[in-house]
Image (spheres, helix red, strand yellow):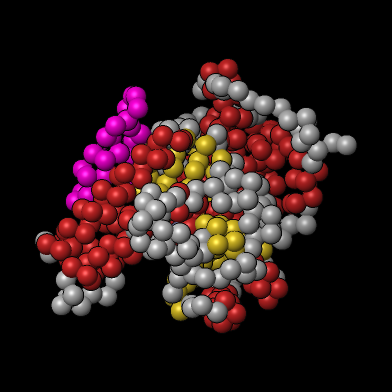
Amino acid sequence: MIAGMKKQVVAQGSSLSSPIERIRGVRRIDRTTASLATSDLAREINRDIVLEFIRFNQPVSRVNLARLSGLQPSTISAIVDSLLQEGWVKEGEIVRGSRGRPSTMVSISDDVAIFAIDLRPDRAIVAVIDLTGRLLAQETVPVGARPETAVKRLLLCIGRLRERFAAMRFEGVGISVPGRVDPATQRILMAPNLKWHNYDLKGALEEKLKLQVELDNDANACLASELWHGSLDGIGSAVLVAVGEGVGASIFSGGQLVYGFNGLAGEIGHVPIDPEGPRCGCGQRGCWEVFASSRTALERYRKMAPEEEIADIEELLTRAREGDKAAVKVLADQATALGRGLRLITAVLAPELILIAGELTSVWPMIEGRVRKELAARMLAGKPPRLTPAGDARSARLSGAAAILLHRHTYFHRSTHDGKALPAREASMAPRQ
Ligand SMILES: [Zn+2]
């Protein structure tokens, strides 16, 4: 993610704070990969910053964009012209300012969209999302153990949506996956609850759709959604814990998501905390996930109240809200297990903020105290991190998937149809020989 990078560049050009104040600790120049900042790169970064200012302040005039960004009016004009040409923004009404000079307001184009897919173990939600993050349509398709069948259904669904929104330009497909993705090949590396091992979902969809497809883990998608909507502005480090069928985390540090060298960073749900514990979907015993996931809460409820028919996690949460004793008890146990695991995260990463995502957040007031108490117990020193529920996980996975498509591989909001996009970035980022 590029949010932190933008922020730094803005900070350097404005009075927000000096780079010295912002950069604490150790920053390394790696001589094997270092490349000098070219004027092309500076232009690309400024262009992306301006697009973000438009997104968050629209409709906005060029004069105000210059004021907000600290860039020269002539630079703003050049950037806005190129954004208009590429179709990312549009011009709207003409407004007279206090000094009488008319300005044309600029806003984000509303005829560009992304297909966002929230892939789950049993179904996929396919949505059309525009550049401002608005959800324009969504459909659900069943998926199962066979990825080939799922791909056929996804293609049919996307085909239908493409016809329905025939006037829109689709930039690509972003997919939130209940597992981890190889950063180099984009293959699904592991998805214990989905069981599509080493499957090339990106390749299968791209071949038929002729659109760029980007995949990422569901916890990363939820965090990307928070970044896209600006709710982590000013936060230096955060961990989002997605609680659902399993438990996974997304790590945000130094202005970017942390993937690890193999894409598996954040798999804290599969750290065994009890070697004698129940078997986990990953094959080990006693992973944090088998104590803290909502699937476990549901299984426990079924054992505690075998006479009660219960369909899913949503129903369990409804029953807890209605005061069903067994439901309240299993959620309390889940909250305790969750809070204890958060101590691991705090000890290793000491984030400023921990976000909890998942259906469970709908009963947050019922469980918050218990999670917080477990998290705060036996802190080594200082205060525990701030703890809050993330936005609605269902829509977060979709808008995060869209954000990942826009940000991740094109790096900047570059059209995926723009032949110049990738080479320009590669040229500016490539190590010099
Ligand atoms: Zn496991």
Q: Measured along the vertical axis of the image, is residue 39 above or below residue 162?
A: above
Does 253 sit left or right of 207 as displayed? left
Q: Quadrant of the C terminus?
A: top right
Res 378 quadrant in image: top left
Which one is nearer the viewer's eye here, 108 or 288? 288
Which of the 4 quarters of the picture holds residue 308? Answer: bottom left
- The residue lying at 55 percent from left, 62 percent from top is 190
Task: Give percent across and percent down for residue 418.
Answer: 74, 57
Q: Can I make out residue 129 in this image?
A: no
* Residue at image coords 16%, 71%: 305
In the rendered structure, the answer to whether residue 31 lies left or right of residue 343 reads: right
Image-quadrant location for residue 113? bottom right
x%, y% of residue 352?
41, 33
Measured as percent of width and height from the top left, residue 314 is found at: 27, 67
Q: Is residue 430 visible?
A: yes
Within the magenta stretch, is there residue 388? yes
Q: Residue at x 70, y 40 (%)?
A: 44
In the image, the segment drawn in magenta is 363-392
Judged from this view, the residue extending furthest toward the right is: 433
Residue at 16%, 58% (x, y): give it.
328
Q: Is residue 92 left or right of residue 38?
A: left
Q: Quadrant of the N terminus?
A: top right
- Is 213 drawn above or below residue 20 in the view shown? below
